[in-house]
């Protein structure tokens, strides 16, 4: 089961991203409609379409192993980013009404559930996950926020520069291992 | 049958395409998605036969619908008679399925309405037939045979069953004719009629996987309830009831439909038939909407009772969706596409419900209208169709009114998205995605819309590519079937994008390019949402770029510059942007027809322009290559469009390159010609300004750049290339205004990532002011574009720095986030805030680089110069000439030439003068050197020199050897003054000169050196000296001395001349003195030796006026302050020394001559210093004192008694009485020469002197005298008067006695009173 974390600046530019693979098994049961997908075309555009609909690995896996495979493994990084970006629509709407920083499962797209955390500075932490883990995600976000604030304290760090600090990275990873 | 003219509503939907053949198996499951009736429309002229038309109609139908298809249930063809009226189609009535409408007939509308009603009643009738067949046990078994059953053709059903069903058959029309009865009786009839609850398991055609599943769940058999023991009558009636419900719903009998749906649901709940169950739920939901619509259509009040009425429907639909989403594996195996299709339809239906309610501001007539709107395009309620409908405020308002939040809609809608889309056929998928995208657009979810639109594009492009491959294989076109095969009408996607589906249809058809525009618009929209402005580089039509474009682009370029400036931070998601741009280019490349190359180029270059900070090097290369290749291809294919210039503001700086010195015109005021300033003015060039501090100076310092018309101007332009590839510019040209300018465009390749200087040249054609605004730049295949570059004036700099600090202040604070932060969204809102700043900026008109163009100027060149290799070799003091030949190479005659010179000795001397540390005397010497002894000089300065075009003129320059000079420069300034004037306007106060310069290397050999100048008293003939001279054999040396008569009035001038050179020189000193014949002494000075040259000099006296003058300064410098604080006495002596020295140098001149050669020159004595003894020697004393020794024996008044003497040495005998006669003459008689300050005031000028005489002897003790020795009164002496004082002396021993006498004026103290002096040597012999 994988998690994808993105830290976005107010101008939607990612400052930090993390892909975390947890050892926990996937809980969600795939929809039967998503299985046995046919492959329609071999053109590049069909590839894009397949990937965007969240089925790229499914078809390949189907050919490789057959039977019930892990579905919707749209692990294509580009698609993950697209989904994270698209979920901003919902986040922007929800945060307008909901003043909470932690927005639990604000969006669902393909097989992904999107949880978000909006800091007072309008920075958004977006986490794509597959299973429910409300408390873990909440704690995870809080820790990431704390780490982020610590990074911001650095006088040489401006709001719009990507975070490249290895300390930050390792701590976020540790936190992800702990909670996710 | 209802009355044809009865009131009521008939909802007819006219699909534009027949359903796809793959949907054939839905015929019974969802009749509503099939065309129930077909209306053919034909026009008929006299040549056509009705039977032919009918055959054609039927044939066409056959091709559109498969043979075994259930639908269409009714068909009719309306044949319109053509206007000419000549047709005779009277037998038309006899043909069934064909209605002829005569052209004469009036009120066709009503007639056609009747015909339509007729058709509808036919359809309703056919419903009955179909249901009849299904009601039979066999039919029911068929119905239950598979998930999506097909009714076999009529012939397959046994006739008998049809008859048996007669009773049932009769019941149906009764429902039709008596709706109110059915409403009342529906539930009641159930037990007797169709209430056979049968949850069957075994259908004949059921798949092997099914039985176990079904029997496990529902094993109850109810044979007792079976009405007919026919074949396969074991099936449940749920599906039959549901189908009945469908048909009732289609027939508009809502109550009946609702009854049968509920029946079916009861059965489905028991059995496990989720798909059909879901479908029944959908039917029920539809019924509720219809009921609400029919009930509330008239009244405009919305429901307001606690629970929103639509929640019920929504729940039903949600249930249906969840049922659809969980089909059994077996059902999916065979029918995956259809199940997925139904699932998507249900999701969209659910979304549509929520959307309609939301957009219509609640459950009310508007919502029903939205949902029931007929027509092929989707109906957008007025709440969303106005221009700013997508503004957050509006959307939020809708949410707060309806309590349906947008993310609720989105959550429902996103269920439709997933891998299951791949199950759908291409067209259904396309249609579904379009609807999804449209929905997202309407609820303002632009990013999600963009996401889905990318999939739409993927679909479309996939189809295009596949179709292209297919047409390559076989030219036969596939049957046309549009995306509206899906039951949903495609949404019109608001104003952002207009009906892309129409485009896709056209694209699918063949390789026509119609529709490309729409696809590209979708691409651009997607990119824009992600923060890439693909329109950043615009396409311009080739026609417009001739004149107007350049003018228009001015504003855009300046504003461009501004936006570039303001753009410090990144927007959007760079990785996504890059991916999307790549895809956009791929789409543009794959578009059919002409493969939209300009669009490819536009996309590639726009992406480069907007994204280059985040693009990797390889991406930049790729984009650039793609762009340029596409442009080249487009041009090859004759495309009329071009991209405008794209790479930002490339011009960084523009500077005028000063022309070579020979061409540089220098402005001079005309007044210079009228009056020459004094010669001395030229000593200190640059310091001509008499004021030490001149505030006006700084103002005049900034002069305009001046060029002559019709001559090339060079401009250095710095171009920037921020990209990693070599940027190629097809054309780079200056953009100017003012006087006409003939520029030359050049192609430039700017190296990667660098600043590149380019020199552009051109020619102004007229005199005036040339304004260089900027550059016109054109990339290959692009349109030219002007970039202006205002001069960075102070206020401009200030404005920019203010901007910069404002931006820096804003960095890190975000006012606009998300999509609002994109630069093309933001400025509109920001402009209002900075309006005041903008107007302020407007007020200061940008200044540009200016350049004054003056009328044509002549041009000279140095044709020839007489020195070889530009080197002059001279002896010190030698004078030679240089001949300079100038040629006029211009068509204008030169009538003014002036030569000025410069040499290496001038600068240090001028520097020393300017420093002012020199003493007055040195200052004078330096200035004298500069003025009177220049290295170069031009004799005929006043001569008017005219050089007509093409002619030559020779100038002679005198060259003087001066030690220390190593190089020199000849400047020739020339102008054309007397040009014919164009107008009568007053001539300008200035004229322009040009200057030619010729550098010279000067070598001056230092060979003769004068030193140790001395002036001594002439003591008469010294025998020893004469003998010595005789001994040396050089009688000539003393020749001048021999001619001197009166030794008293003379002195001797002597100087050592040393030859430091390797050649012998002949040195001559000339004396030219008033009152004495000219005299000259010539000696040969051999190399390495020193010769003393002696020349007698007559003593002279300068008047007091002359010597009292201060040492003059030759330049016109002011405020020369004497720094050395000298006392009056010292100053007097200094001035006296100065003036006497000058006088001596006037009298004595030295020359040299090469021994045995022709070269000659002058020998300067200027380095020699004059000392006070020399001064005393050369000056005529005030009182002349002559002493002589006389024997006392002789008469005193004659000279006979004078002792023998040699010079001033007297030979006397010891112990002999002698007289020492001192003769004192007052020489101050000549008034004009009697001005010595040496005399005190009361005894000045011609007043008689009262003198005393002091005598002294050495040794004094061996001399006896009578009287006193000091202060012997002499008395009054009138001028010219002489008096003798006698003193009796006696030498008492032998030896040499030195007797001195000093004359003093009476009363004066110390040295100042000394006016005369003499001495005498007496050699006294003792008589042994």
Image (spheres, coloured by chain):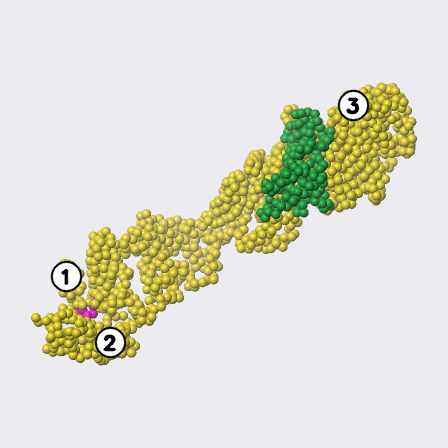
Chain colours: A green, B yellow
Q: Chain letter of disc 3?
A: B
Q: CA distance from mark 1 to mark 2?
A: 38 Å
Q: Chain letter of disc 1?
A: B
The C terminus of chain B: image quadrant: bottom left
Q: Position of residue B1117 (x, y in %)?
A: 38, 64
Q: Position of residue B703 (x, y in %)?
A: 47, 56
- The reply to the same-chain question for discs 1 and 2 is yes
Outermost residue toward the front?
A178
Q: CA distance from mark 3 to mark 1?
A: 159 Å
The N terminus of chain B: image quadrant: top right
- The reply to the same-chain question for discs 3 and 1 is yes
Give the label on residue B210, or none. 3
Q: Residue at x 70, y 41 (%)?
A: A138
Question: Which portion, as a residue range, is magenta?
Answer: B1045-1051
Q: Secondary structure at mark 2?
A: strand
Question: In the image shown, does B406 or B1295 lie closer to the viewer?
Answer: B1295
Q: In the visual, does B497 lie left or right of B538?
A: right
Question: In the image shown, does B303 or B855 lie closer to the viewer?
Answer: B303
Q: Is residue B175 magenta?
A: no
Q: Is residue B1010 visible?
A: yes
Q: Secondary structure at mark 1?
A: helix
Q: Residue at x 15, y 66 (%)?
A: B1021
Q: Quadrant of residue B49?
A: top right
Give the label on residue B1304, or none. 2
Give the label on residue B583, or none. none
Q: Position of residue B732 (x, y in %)?
A: 51, 43
Question: In the image shown, does B158 or B326 lie closer to the viewer?
Answer: B326
Q: Quadrant of residue B976?
A: bottom left
C-beta proximity under 8 Å, tags 3 and 2: no
| Location of mark 1 (residue) | B1028
């Amino acid at each position: 089961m994988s998690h994808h974390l993105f830290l976005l600046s107010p101008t939607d530019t990612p400052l930090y991203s993390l892909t975390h693979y947890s050892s926990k098994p996937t809980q969600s049961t795939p929809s039967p409609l998503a299985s046995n997908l046919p492959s329609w075309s071999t053109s590049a555009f069909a590839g894009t379409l397949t990937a965007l609909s969240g089925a790229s690995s499914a078809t390949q896996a189907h050919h490789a192993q057959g039977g019930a495979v892990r579905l919707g493994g749209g692990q294509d990084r580009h698609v993950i980013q697209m989904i994270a970006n698209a979920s901003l629509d919902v986040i922007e709407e929800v945060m307008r009404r909901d003043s909470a920083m932690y927005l639990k499962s604000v969006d669902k797209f393909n097989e992904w559930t999107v949880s978000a955390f909006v800091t007072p500075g309008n920075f958004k932490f977006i986490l794509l996950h597959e299973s429910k883990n409300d408390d873990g995600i909440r704690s995870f976000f809080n820790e990431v926020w704390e780490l982020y604030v610590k990074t911001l304290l650095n006088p040489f760090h401006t709001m719009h520069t990507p975070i490249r600090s290895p300390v930050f990275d390792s701590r976020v990873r540790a936190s992800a291992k702990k909670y996710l | 049958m209802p009355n044809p003219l009865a009131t009521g509503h008939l909802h007819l939907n006219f699909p534009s395409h027949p359903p796809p053949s793959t949907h054939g198996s839905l015929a019974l499951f969802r009749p509503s998605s099939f065309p129930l009736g077909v209306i053919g429309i034909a026009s008929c002229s006299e040549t056509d036969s009705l039977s032919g038309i009918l055959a054609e109609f039927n044939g066409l139908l056959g091709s559109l619908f498969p043979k075994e298809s259930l639908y269409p249930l009714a068909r009719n063809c309306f044949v319109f008679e053509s206007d000419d009226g000549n047709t005779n189609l009277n037998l038309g009535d006899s043909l069934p399925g064909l209605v002829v409408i005569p052209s004469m007939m009036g009120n066709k509308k009503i007639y056609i309405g009747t015909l339509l009603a007729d058709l509808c009643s036919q359809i309703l009738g056919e419903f009955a037939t179909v249901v009849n067949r299904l009601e039979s046990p066999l039919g029911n078994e068929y119905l239950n045979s598979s998930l999506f059953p097909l009714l076999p053709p009529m012939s397959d059903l046994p006739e008998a069953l049809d008859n048996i069903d007669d009773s049932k058959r009769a019941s149906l029309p009764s429902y039709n004719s008596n709706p109110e009865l059915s409403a009342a009786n529906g539930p009641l009839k159930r037990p007797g009629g169709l209430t056979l609850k049968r949850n069957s398991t075994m259908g004949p055609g059921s798949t092997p996987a099914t039985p176990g599943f079904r029997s496990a769940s529902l094993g109850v058999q109810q044979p007792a309830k079976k009405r007919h023991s026919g074949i396969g009558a074991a099936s449940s009636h749920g599906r039959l009831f549901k189908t009945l419900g469908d048909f009732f719903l289609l027939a508009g009998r809502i109550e009946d439909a609702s009854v049968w749906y509920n029946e079916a649901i009861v059965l489905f709940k028991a059995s496990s038939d989720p798909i059909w169950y879901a479908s029944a739920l959908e039917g029920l939901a539809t019924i509720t909407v219809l009921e609400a619509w029919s009930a509330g259509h008239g009244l405009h009040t919305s429901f307001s009772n606690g629970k929103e009425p639509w929640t019920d429907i929504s729940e039903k639909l949600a249930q249906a969706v969840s049922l659809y989403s969980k089909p059994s594996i077996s059902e999916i195996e065979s029918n995956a596409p259809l199940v997925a299709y139904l699932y998507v339809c249900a999701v969209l239906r659910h979304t549509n419900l929520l959307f309609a309610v939301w957009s219509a501001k609640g459950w009310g007539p508007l919502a029903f209208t939205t949902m029931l709107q007929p027509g092929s395009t989707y109906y957008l309620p007025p709440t969303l169709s106005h221009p700013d409908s997508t503004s957050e405020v509006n959307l939020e308002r809708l949410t707060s009114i309806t309590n349906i939040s947008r993310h609720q809609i989105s959550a429902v809608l996103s269920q439709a998205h997933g891998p299951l889309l791949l199950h759908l056929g291409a067209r259904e998928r396309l249609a579904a995605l379009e609807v999804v995208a449209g929905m997202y657009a309407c609820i303002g979810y632009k990013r999600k819309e963009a996401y889905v639109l990318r999939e739409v594009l993927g679909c479309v492009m996939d189809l295009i590519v596949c179709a292209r491959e297919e047409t390559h294989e076989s030219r036969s076109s596939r049957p046309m079937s549009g995306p509206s095969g899906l039951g949903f009408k495609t949404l019109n996607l608001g104003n952002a994008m207009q009906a892309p589906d129409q485009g896709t249809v056209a694209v699918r058809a063949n390789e026509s390019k119609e529709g490309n525009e729409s696809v590209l618009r979708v691409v651009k929209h997607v990119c824009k949402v992600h923060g890439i402005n693909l329109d950043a580089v615009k396409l311009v039509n080739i026609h417009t770029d001739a004149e107007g474009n350049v003018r228009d682009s001015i504003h855009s370029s300046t504003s461009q510059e501004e936006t570039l400036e303001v753009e410090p931070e990144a927007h959007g998601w760079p990785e996504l942007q890059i991916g999307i741009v790549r895809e956009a280019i791929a789409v543009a490349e794959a578009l059919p027809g002409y493969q939209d190359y300009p669009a490819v180029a536009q996309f590639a270059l726009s992406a480069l322009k907007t994204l280059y900070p985040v693009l990797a090097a390889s991406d930049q290369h790729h984009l650039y290559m793609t762009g340029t290749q596409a442009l080249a291809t487009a041009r090859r294919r004759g495309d009329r469009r071009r991209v405008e210039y794209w790479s930002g503001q490339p011009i960084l700086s523009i500077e005028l390159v000063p022309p070579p010195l020979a061409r540089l015109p220098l402005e001079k005021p005309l007044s210079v010609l009228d009056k020459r300033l004094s010669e001395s003015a030229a000593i200190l060039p640059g310091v001509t300004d008499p004021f030490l501090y001149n505030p006006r100076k700084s103002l005049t310092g900034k002069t305009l750049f001046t060029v002559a018309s019709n001559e090339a101007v060079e401009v250095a332009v710095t171009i920037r290339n921020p990209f990693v590839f070599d940027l190629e510019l097809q054309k780079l040209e200056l953009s100017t205004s003012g006087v006409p300018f003939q520029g030359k465009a050049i192609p430039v390749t700017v190296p990667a990532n660098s600043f590149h200087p380019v020199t552009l040249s051109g020619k102004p054609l007229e005199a005036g002011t040339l304004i260089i605004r900027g550059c016109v730049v054109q990339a290959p295949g692009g349109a030219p574009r002007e970039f202006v570059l205002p001069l960075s004036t102070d206020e401009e700099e200030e404005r920019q720095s203010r901007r910069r600090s404002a931006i820096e202040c804003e960095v890190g604070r975000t006012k606009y986030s998300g999509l609002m932060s994109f630069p093309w969204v933001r400025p509109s809102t920001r402009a209002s805030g900075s309006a005041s700043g903008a107007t302020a900026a407007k007020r200061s008109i940008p200044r540009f680089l200016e350049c004054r163009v003056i009328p044509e100027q002549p041009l000279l060149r140095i044709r020839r110069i007489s020195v070889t290799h530009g080197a002059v070799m001279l002896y010190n003091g030698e004078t030679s000439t240089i001949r300079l030949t100038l040629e006029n190479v211009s068509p204008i005659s030169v009538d003014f030439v002036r030569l000025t010179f410069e040499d290496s000795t001038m600068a240090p001397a001028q520097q020393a003068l300017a420093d002012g540390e020199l003493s007055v005397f040195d200052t004078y010497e330096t200035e004298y050197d500069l003025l009177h002894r220049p290295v170069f000089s031009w004799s005929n300065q006043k001569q008017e020199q005219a050089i007509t075009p093409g002619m030559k003129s020779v100038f002679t320059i005198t060259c003087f050897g001066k030690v220390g000079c190593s190089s020199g420069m000849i400047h020739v300034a020339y102008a054309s003054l007397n040009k014919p004037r164009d107008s009568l306007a007053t001539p300008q106060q200035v004229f322009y000169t040009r200057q030619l310069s010729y550098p010279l290397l000067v070598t001056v050999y230092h060979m003769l050196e004068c030193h140790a100048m001395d002036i001594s008293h002439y003591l008469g003939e010294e025998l020893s000296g004469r003998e010595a001279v005789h001994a040396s054999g050089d009688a000539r040396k003393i020749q001048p001395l021999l001619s001197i008569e009166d030794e008293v009035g003379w002195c001797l001038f002597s100087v050592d001349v040393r030859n430091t050179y390797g050649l012998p020189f002949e040195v001559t000193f000339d004396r030219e003195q008033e009152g004495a014949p000219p005299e000259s002494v010539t000696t040969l000075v051999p190399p390495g030796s020193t010769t003393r040259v002696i020349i007698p000099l007559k003593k002279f006296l300068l008047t007091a006026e002359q010597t009292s003058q201060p040492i003059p300064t030759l330049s016109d410098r002011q405020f020369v302050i004497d720094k050395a604080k000298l006392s009056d006495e010292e100053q007097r002596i200094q001035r006296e020394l100065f003036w006497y020295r000058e006088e001596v140098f006037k009298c004595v001149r030295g020359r040299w001559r090469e021994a045995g050669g022709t070269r000659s020159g002058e020998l300067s004595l200027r380095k020699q210093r004059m000392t006070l003894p020399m001064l005393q020697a050369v000056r005529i004393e005030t009182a002349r004192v002559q002493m002589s020794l006389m024997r006392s024996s002789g008469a005193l008044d004659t000279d006979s008694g004078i002792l023998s003497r040699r010079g001033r040495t007297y030979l006397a005998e010891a112990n002999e009485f002698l007289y020492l006669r001192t003769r004192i003459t007052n020489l101050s008689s000549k008034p004009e020469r009697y001005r010595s300050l040496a005399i005190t005031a009361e005894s000045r000028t011609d007043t008689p002197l009262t003198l005393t005489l002091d005598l002294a002897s050495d040794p004094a003790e061996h001399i006896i005298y009578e009287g006193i020795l000091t202060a012997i009164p002499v008395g009054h002496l009138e001028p010219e008067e002489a008096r003798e004082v006698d003193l009796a002396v006696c030498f008492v021993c032998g030896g040499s006695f030195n007797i001195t006498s000093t004359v003093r004026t009476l009363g004066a103290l110390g040295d100042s009173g000394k006016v005369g002096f003499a001495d005498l040597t007496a050699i006294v012999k003792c008589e042994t």
